[in-house]
Image (cartoon, helix red, strand yellow):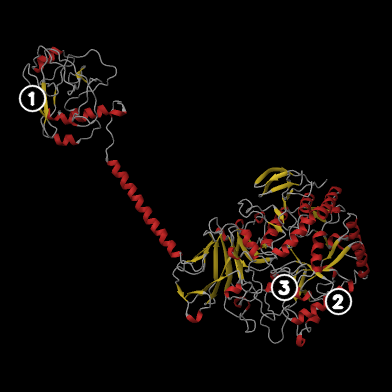
Amino acid sequence: MNRVLLMRNQTKPPINSSFDDLVEAGGIRVPDACPSPLPPARRRIGQVTGPSKSGLNYEPVHSESEEISDLDMSETESPVSSHPVPSGRVRVGISLDPKGRSTKKTKKKGELDDDTEICLKPLATRRNSGIIPLKIADSNFLKSDPDGDTTDEDVDNKGDSPVQQNGGNKFTKIFKDKLNSVPIPKIFHKRKPKEYKLQVFVAILFLTIILLVGSIYVIHQEKELQKSYFDRIRFSHKDRRIRVSNEKGKDILTGILGANLAKKDKAWPCLKQDEKPGHTCLEWMNKARLYFRIKHQNLMDTGFSAAPNDSTAAPEGRASSLRCYEIYWEAINPDFKLKDCYSLGERGGGHFYGGGEIPGSDHWPLNKTSVPYSPFITGNRMTSESDTHFQWGRTLGRFFINSDGAAIQITEDTPLHVSINEDGDRKLCLGSRFEGYGNDPQENGQRNRQNGPTRPLHLNYTICTGENALETAELLADKDIWDGLKHEDLQVARLLAQSPIWRILPETINHGHFSEAALLNYTDRIASLHLSEGYILFDESWQQRIGDLAMDLTRFPTMDETLNITRRRGFKVALTIQPFFSTQSRNYEEGLYAGDNDDEIWLAEKNSDKKKVPALTQYKNWTSVAVLDCTKSSAQQWLEKKVSAVVDKYRIDALYVDLGTTYDLPKFYEFSKPLSSSDYYKDLFLKALRPIQHVRTIVVSSAVKLPKLPTFVSLSPTESSWEGLQSVIPNILTMGVAGYPFIIPGAIGGDFWPVGKSNASYRMSSEGSFRVPDRDLYIRWLELVHFLPVVQYSFLPSDYDQKVVDIATNMYFTRKNKLYPYIKKAIDQSLTTGLPVIRPLWMIDPTDATCLKISDEFSIGEDIIVAPVIRPGEVERDIYLPKGIWRNEMDGSPTKGEKWLHHYRVKENQIPFFTKMPGVGSYVLDN
């Protein structure tokens, strides 16, 4: 037990007392000499330095040479030096009991002790500058800690004598607090307790348990989803999640089947009588049944027969890379709406392409656009500003493909509804509803047995997986284009790619007064451009009333001779016909009795009784028109007879068929034979025209199935604006992926003026008699179209200045002499591969992430990359080249691909394009 020697004040001395006064006041006797220096194990605590309230100040003395010992009075160790005790001093010892309380003991004169001692010396007149004084207060101050709060020691020392209260514990607390305020090197601080190691261990153990439990939960959820119905498709009947993987095991398509089912709905195995051979069947009670089956590439090996338009069969040598699975929903409850949704994400979704024309210019890939849940039927590619009504474009394909190589192909008999990223949900949803298809019982009334649905509401589609998007597109493309193709048909298709179409707009001819003289003047203007070839296309104004199917003799009394002159100038003649007949036309009344049994050949009103009443609608500027019912064989024969008569009389070379859209049909109608979609009447109308001799249908305005060559499919009418120009490339790429390789991009400069929009760009013609598109817009549109499969004019270059004429002339000869070989090659490839003539860049490199998103560049086949200027005021643009070596046809320099060309300068009369090495020679539009 350590003992500390302290001075005891029996009588409080006056302030500034001398040492002798202190000795006298305390009855202290001073010995002659101080004992020898303390051994290393002992410690000097302090020395009296100056006056204080008690008459003494206590100052610690430090020494680096002495060893440090543990003292109970402080947790911080501080070395102090020892000094000889001056003579005349008395040693007073205080020992500590086991509880840390002090007991007083007075030593006799000259007696030494082995315990730690402190010697007192006279008041110091000098203070060590490196020492902070430690004041020892009187007993009243020692009753509380420096913060004014009573300490544990105070409680322990209550009732003790004054000596005990001013003793060990109080002195230890005060000394510890003061000593902690002294800056001491970090090496002398007491180290952290070892308990922190236990805390770290507990924290790590806790995190490990959390991770383990989380991993077990994830594995459990994965096991729930691991039920593999086929080699690449996994489905959880609990939450109806589906995952489709490729041959490498990567998820390339994820989604939820039965999106309209509730969480509480439980799946059950189908009853025996509801099962189908080769299918896996699940049933949700009183709502729907789901059937799965695998569809191999070689359907003959599995015993399944392919549908007439089934494209799942792959070419030889590619069978191992493609897997196809059929998903078939059947509604048990007629009020239940079937709907499946797939992710439009980077994981298990990727970028999606296909479908049909969409309003706007920023929809390639489909992840960038938003389409509300709506019927997948042809429309005018518009969104009404007054309401939320959405319409697709005039050409649709029931085919979607993503960048990971997963494709979805919906059957023709499904009343399909589609939404894309509706309300930002990042999903492609496919549904089935009768509404909007002209055969909805709730919308059109209770249908009779003849035209009623032959089976319950269903949703039927096929999912196919390949190594990447290009391989899947190749394997699923239509390989039957060659079937039934005649050599003459191929020659007509090549002629269309080589020569322009000159579409006559009545308002651009003789102030809107279309006549034979105006026609000859129009062809003279074309001949002055040295462009005397191609088709002169008449719109429906060649008839007095739409549906007459006869030349208007009032305006064209000698039209046969006028057309002969036109042919001698190097042109061919094409007429526009439609399935719409004005009630004022000469054929409407005849059609009321032209059918079998003297019945009508027109589309009839819904639920009309024994005598069918024609269902009337409006079309363009005609407010009362009937529609030919092409499901009747008598109607097809009647149409063939009428068209053949006018073709033979005027020796017409080709037909342009304006089929309208589903929205142009009457609101309440019915065909004589049921159609799963009203859009399929278009194919029946074209079928009626095929037997006509010496004439070819070169263009259709709308399609839901690929027509046979030489028929090209036209884009929906495009507004004359920069936004309209920017929409051309995305829509052509979309139609190509959706299964239409042969496309006409519409007229140079656009097809109609924007109404009520600030982006309208037009001016008056050079003659000042009619409006024409803006000059810069027309030039950029002209440059773009000359790299597309077919060139079509509605406004002549001579409607502008001579610079525009020169650009048009140079583009014409460049296309004919240099570009046409590449276009012809791409057309021939499309006949055998089914791939489009105009292709997205990812069909050159499907693994390039940049190529998957480029929407303002395209390739002609696989040989030419085109990067047109399509924004107002642009004199430069950024161009991306895929892998390979490409020849810059503006300066002839070779350029390595897989990189961007930033700030590429482009003049007004130039269009950047690159050919795969070896190239076709240097090329600048103005030479």
- Please provide percent x and percent y for residue 312: 62, 68
Is residue 389 visible in this depiction of the protein? no
* Front residue of 916 and 868: 916
| Most foreground residue, 409 or 122 | 409
Q: Badge 3 is on which residue?
A: 683
Where residue 825 sits, quadrant-wise, is bottom right
Task: Identify which residue is drawn at 65% across, 52% down.
Answer: 854
> Which numbered disc, 2 or 1, marks the residue closer to the eye?
2
Residue 261's label in the rendered image is none
- Amino acid type, callout 3: Asp
Q: Is residue 629 left or right of residue 220?
A: right
Residue occupying image coordinates x 16% and y 19%: 38
Q: What residue type is labelled 1?
A: Lys
**Residue ID for mark 1:** 105
| Apparent side of residue 660 relative to residue 229 in the rendered image (left or right) | right
Q: In this view, does 399 lie to the left or right of 892?
A: left
Upstream in the sequence, badge 2 or badge 1? 1
Identify whether 15 is placed above or below 507: above
> What is the secondary structure assignment of the residue under circle 2?
helix
Give percent across and percent down for residue 133.
Answer: 25, 21
In this rendering, the answer to whether 495 lies above or below 117 is below
Mark 3 vs mark 2, CA separation in Å:
22 Å
* Disc 2 target residue: 645
Marks 2 and 1, how far apart at CA: 143 Å
Q: Quadrant of residue 345?
A: bottom right
Quadrant placement of the N terminus: top left
Dot 2 amino acid type: Ala
The residues bearing labels 3 and 1 have C-alpha atoms spaced at a distance of 123 Å
What is the quadrant of the C terminus in the image? top right
